[in-house]
């Protein structure tokens, strides 16, 4: 974070942070009076309570949560492993970097029908979509961070004659930690997107499917409740990863 | 982009096409999963004959370009505002980053009722995604202009407006360009995925349609077309970068 000269106090920051949500709720309320499909915030909260109290809907939430956690964990592991390999090996990078950059730039949602053909409507398709979405940002950012690492780190590793594993854990990883932590946050956001988009298109359950069903029967308060839950999951996950980032980077100092 | 890089991309694409031909020629992979090139050529001929290709490519490209332009027009001033007024930055920053993890298409029904059945629901929702990277990178770029350059401007008695235009903005440009590139990626991804879920026209909606009627050949034609269109859009931005960064490192 860029620290301006006069760092405002904690309380003031917290106050400033609450402004945006408050404004958002006010705008939402005004919209709900103007447009009939937008439910009032109070009705959405009512629907949310009903949603959380209904076992069937709770199962949808649980299903999506599990898919997101599995997809993100796999994305992080795959992205870390492949990103390190490509970042540290110039030969592999020369062969595969263009493919990775192309894959990172194109809309990967277009492959979902192929996943459906391969894996069917069950959870696997959505998890794989989440992994495809989430792996690439981790992989590409880690790869370029390691490839552009200052040469002095490699020299230190060689001079201290540490083994490759120790050099990786003690020198290279700390060197790219700031980039890696941001890349993991991006990977999480994209895993969420992959899973939910897949569920919105075709799925045997989950929050995406819940949103589509409530939309098709015109139950807009429930639709809004579903949207709120999806937003809460992504905000909570991003928040946790931001906290992890602060912890990891503080240790470094 | 250097000739060597372009060679790398071409070699990669050729290798993929070779693998594809190999996998389909010996029927290693079922044609329900991966159609062969002749099957796709036949599907492409049919689609060209009934004029679907031009219309759908046109409407997807139009949506991508519109959301990108709106992103640039809104993102630059928003970034300047975030840089100039720190409380606005504290109030908005955490949420700006978090918006990416919300599948904005869930707001589509509301936008549809507000704006009608046309290109605007997709364009405006995507514009939310394209505005943010430009705003954030503009803020960072303006913030990180080297103090020594600003001081040189001051000692040469330039007005604040001159310092902004002649020093701060050029110093921020590489960072802003980074945001603009990312914004184009989001424009492509946003438009195609929203078409996929919600729209009746456009490349995304065609892929889904042909999946649903089990016409795998046509589905793949539209998948490849989508990849081609996204490659061209991103390539266009990279070309602009090459021109404006010419002679700078």
Image (cartoon, coloured by chain):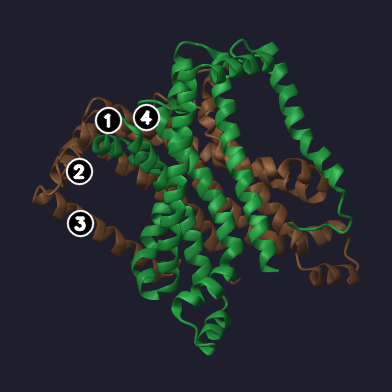
Chain colours: A green, B brown
Say which residue appears at 53% left-offset and 89% top-offset: A159
Q: Position of residue A61 (x, y in %)?
A: 49, 28
Question: Which residue shows up at 51% across the image and 16% down it?
Answer: A54
Q: Is residue B68 left or right of residue A18?
A: left
User: Label 3, on which residue?
Assistant: B19
The x and y percentages for residue B228 are: 35, 47
Instruction: Give the spatial CA distance, label 1 vs label 3.
Output: 23 Å
What subunit carries mark 3? B
Q: Which mark is residue B34?
A: 2
Q: Chain of mark 4?
A: B
Which quadrant would residue A41 be assigned to in this image? top right
Q: CA separation, marks 3 and 4?
A: 28 Å
> Which residue is depicted at the point 67% across and 40% down?
B95
Name the residue carrying label 1. B211
Q: Are marks 3 and 4 on the same chain?
A: yes
Query: Comparing marks 3 and 4, which lies closer to the viewer?
Result: 3
**Relative to B173, is A203 above or below?**
above
Looking at the image, is B159 positioned above or below residue A207? below
Q: Which mark is residue A235?
A: none
Real-space Cα separation, disc 4 to disc 2, in angstroms: 20 Å
Q: What is the C-alpha distance between the residues marked 4 and 1?
A: 10 Å
Tell me the CA gap for discs 3 and 2.
Answer: 11 Å
Tell me the crowding category of disc 1: few under 14, some 14 to 19, or many 20 or more residues within 10 angstroms, Cα based: many
Does label 3 or label 2 sit earlier along the sequence? 3
Q: Which quadrant: the C terminus of chain B?
A: bottom right
Q: Are marks 1 and 3 in contact (CB under 8 Å)?
A: no
Q: Residues within 10 Å of mark 3 (few under 14, many from 20)?
A: few
Let me know if marks 4 and 1 both belong to one chain.
Answer: yes
Counting other residues with Cα less than 10 Å from the Cα at mark 2, is it few (<14), some (14-19), or many (20 or more)?
many
Visible residue check, residue B58: yes
Mark 3 or 4, nearer chain start: 3
């Amino acid at each position: 974070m860029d620290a301006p000269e006069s760092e405002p106090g904690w309380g003031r920051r917290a106050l400033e942070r609450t402004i945006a949500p408050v404004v958002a709720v006010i705008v939402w309320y005004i919209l709900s009076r103007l447009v009939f499909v937008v439910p009032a915030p109070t009705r959405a909260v009512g629907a949310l309570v009903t949603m959380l109290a209904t076992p069937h809907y709770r199962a949808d939430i649980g299903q999506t949560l599990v898919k997101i956690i599995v997809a993100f964990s796999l994305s992080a592991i795959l992205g870390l492993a492949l990103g390190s390999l490509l970042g540290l090996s110039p030969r592999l990078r020369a062969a595969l970097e263009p493919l990775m950059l192309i894959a990172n730039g194109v809309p990967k949602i277009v492959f979902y029908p192929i996943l459906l053909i391969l894996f069917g409507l069950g959870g696997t398709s959505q998890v794989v979509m989440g992994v495809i979405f989430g792996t690439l940002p981790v992989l590409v950012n880690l790869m370029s961070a390691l490839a552009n690492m200052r040469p002095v780190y490699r020299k230190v590793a060689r001079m201290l004659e540490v083994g490759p594993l120790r050099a990786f854990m003690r020198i290279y990883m700390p060197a790219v930690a700031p980039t890696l932590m941001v890349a993991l946050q991006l990977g999480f956001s994209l895993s969420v997107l992959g899973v939910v988009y897949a569920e919105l298109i075709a799925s045997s359950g989950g929050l995406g499917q819940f949103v589509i069903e409530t939309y098709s029967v015109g139950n807009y308060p429930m639709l809004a409740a579903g949207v709120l839950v999806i937003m809460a999951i992504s905000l909570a996950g991003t928040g946790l990863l931001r906290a992890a980032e602060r912890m990891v980077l503080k240790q470094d100092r | 982009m250097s000739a060597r890089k372009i060679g790398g991309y071409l070699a990669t694409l050729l290798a993929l096409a070779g693998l594809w031909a190999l996998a389909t020629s010996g029927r290693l992979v079922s044609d329900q999963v991966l159609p062969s090139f002749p099957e796709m050529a036949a599907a492409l001929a049919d689609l060209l004959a009934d004029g679907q290709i031009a219309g759908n490519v046109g409407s997807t490209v139009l949506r991508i370009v519109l959301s990108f332009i709106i992103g640039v027009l809104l993102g630059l001033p928003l970034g300047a505002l975030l840089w100039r007024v720190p409380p606005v930055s504290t109030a908005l920053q955490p949420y700006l980053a978090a918006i990416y993890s919300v599948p904005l298409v869930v707001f589509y029904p509301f936008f549809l009722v507000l704006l009608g059945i046309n290109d605007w629901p997709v364009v405006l929702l995507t514009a939310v995604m394209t505005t943010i990277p430009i705003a954030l990178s503009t803020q960072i770029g303006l913030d990180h202009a080297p103090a020594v350059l600003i001081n040189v401007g001051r000692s040469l008695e330039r007005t604040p407006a001159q310092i902004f235009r002649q020093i701060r903005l050029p110093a921020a440009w590489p960072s802003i360009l980074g945001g603009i590139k990312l914004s184009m990626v989001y424009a492509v991804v946003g438009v195609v995925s929203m078409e996929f879920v919600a729209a009746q026209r456009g490349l995304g909606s065609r892929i889904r349609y042909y999946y649903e009627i089990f016409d795998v050949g046509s589905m793949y034609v539209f998948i490849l077309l989508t990849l081609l269109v996204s490659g061209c859009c991103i390539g266009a931005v990279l070309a602009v970068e090459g021109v404006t960064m010419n002679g700078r490192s």
